[in-house]
Amino acid sequence: MSSILVVGSLAYDDVRTPVATRDGVLGGAASYFAMAASLYAPVRLVGVIGDDFRDEDIARLRDRGIDLAGLERRRGRSFRWTGTYDFALDTAETINTDLGVFGDWRPRVPDAFADSELVFLANIHPEIQLATLAQVKAPKAVALDTMNYWIEHEKDALVRVISKVDIISINEGEARQLCETFSIVRAAREILALGPKVLVVKRGEHGATLFTKDAMFLAPAYPLEEVVDPTGAGDTFAGGFIGYLAECAAFDDATLRRAVLHGSVCASFAVERFSVEGIAAADRAGIDQRYEALRAFTRV
Amino acid sequence: MSSILVVGSLAYDDVRTPVATRDGVLGGAASYFAMAASLYAPVRLVGVIGDDFRDEDIARLRDRGIDLAGLERRRGRSFRWTGTYDFALDTAETINTDLGVFGDWRPRVPDAFADSELVFLANIHPEIQLATLAQVKAPKAVALDTMNYWIEHEKDALVRVISKVDIISINEGEARQLCETFSIVRAAREILALGPKVLVVKRGEHGATLFTKDAMFLAPAYPLEEVVDPTGAGDTFAGGFIGYLAECAAFDDATLRRAVLHGSVCASFAVERFSVEGIAAADRAGIDQRYEALRAFTRV
């Protein structure tokens, strides 16, 4: 089993869906990722919170066994995101982003975390991803997520960090935007040519596609009767995916495929409730049950 | 091997995509369906054409071995559909529909076709689907397609015909509309409760989901680098799906799953070219090659 380092945001989210509203609930890429990945392997978290961050939310992370030695508390407000979803519950419309203490934060990886074996660089400025990566000694695999904003405004830096990582997980739309092509197959080839050995294209309710140099794996989303809040689905997916790889300490094709299904399963728990509540309530037995169900749903 | 009867439209389409335009090309649900299904089993076609219908298009169908004893030629124009696609190449916007001779057509199933073992009732007024079905003696399985217009305007008749068929194939959006729910899982349960034993929910580039009382099968679309014209993809899917069932003369769960993948493969050939050109150029060796590739893309 390998250790996992995650570097990214912890946030308070204000979320509106057509049926309900939640204000000031725990969110952020690192929160979702860590809650999922910690079901599989030891997780170390590097992040920043403001002085408004609730002790009970720190406790939720700690109770999951997440090592918070890299969690800085600074004066000011925690990162706050306000978003809304329409009836299709797919793409969030951002109403407001208040970076707070996250705005000028430069992650410092504690010495004790420098030997982490798997690293997940959650969505943040690509220059900061590069600077963070430089603080890790000899990771077995580095994974990266990003967003449309950096593709639009910091493409050169983003391409530089992509060339240094092993695994990249991005949305379908972002893959298209990055490569300026509508064809995902073509975009995948171009992204892998930048350096990564593994690309996961997340397709929301439609699942995810894994691309390597030699293979492609088409994974469905776990079918749910009802989705409550899709916030964090992608980061929870990444948590299950990287978590499973860490648990297996392997990166072969068969392990990668199973890891994608674990990502789908974790995401399915996340979207069933608001905030991190869904993935927080999941345990490994429940994960394994849905994993077997998902395999049965795809077996020919 | 079972015989297949298809009842539906033959049309001339005017199609606009962001990169090209084709006018007056062979289209219609029955054309696409029959071109695909005839790769698997004997196909009998019941349809109507106007006096503008080209002999060369009749020859294309006949050369595929399709029995055209149920093809009526009437005075007037053939059904003509004009549609346009945006860059995403997913949903067609209908610019114009000119029903022509199709408008007041009442299908007559020739006596020689009355013993057909599989029946595909392509999209048409549900009352006409019912009247057509009454002309077939003892089919092993009847499948039905429909469209949003009938769900909106002829729901009672549509529900009556749905209750008499074994297999229904509809789009994701139509399933939602029919059951007035966003949840496909819930819609599937409601549709199966109406009578059919098998439901296939078509999800375009995202694949298709098979629902039976006891099982669910999540099938991807065959991944293509480029889509040229998605017109007819759903009917070609149905042709591959029903064609494979006819070839196997079986309806067990394993056969149904393989049939869905054959549907995906046939649709992938259809969308690679305009009109029926893509599926017309496909042969069984090419189909089987993509089928094996698609299995490999989903194997865990």
Image (cartoon, coloured by chain):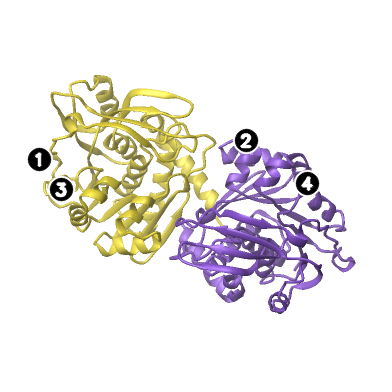
Chain colours: A purple, B yellow
Can residue A278 be seen from the camera position used here?
Answer: yes
Q: Circle 3 — which element?
A: helix
Q: Amino acid at mark 3?
A: Glu
Residue at the (53%, 72%) spot, across then down: A289
Q: Circle 2 — which element?
A: loop
How packed is label 1: few (under 14 Cα within 10 Å), some, or many (20 or more)? few
Residue A180: numbered disc? 2
Q: Circle 1 — which element?
A: helix
**Quadrant in which the N terminus of chain A is drawn:** bottom right
Figure label count: 4
- Determine the CA span between mark 4 and mark 1: 70 Å
Are the residues under badges 4 and 1 in a single subunit? no
Q: Position of residue B263 (x, y in %)?
A: 39, 45
How packed is label 2: few (under 14 Cα within 10 Å), some, or many (20 or more)? few
Extreme-left residue of the structure: B111
Are the residues under badges 1 and 3 in a single subunit? yes
Residue B111: numbered disc? 1
Q: Position of residue A168 (x, y in %)?
A: 69, 50
Q: Amino acid at mark 1?
A: Asp
- Determine the CA span between mark 3 and mark 4: 61 Å
> Which one is closest to the eye, mark 3 or mark 2?
2
Check whether the beta carbons of the residues at disc 1 and disc 3 lie within 8 A of each other: no
- Determine the CA span between mark 4 and mark 2: 19 Å
Asked whether, in this view, residue A17 is left or right of residue A248, the answer is: left
Check whether the beta carbons of the residues at disc 3 and disc 4 lie within 8 A of each other: no
Identify the chain of the residue marked 4, using the numbered disc in the image. A
Asked whether, in this view, residue A183 is left or right of residue B262, the answer is: right
Question: Of label 1 and label 3, which has the lower sequence position?
Answer: 1
Q: Position of residue B292 (x, y in %)?
A: 49, 45
Can you say whether B89 is above or below A21 in the image? Answer: above
Check whether the beta carbons of the residues at disc 3 and disc 2 lie within 8 A of each other: no
Identify the chain of the residue marked 3, using the numbered disc in the image. B
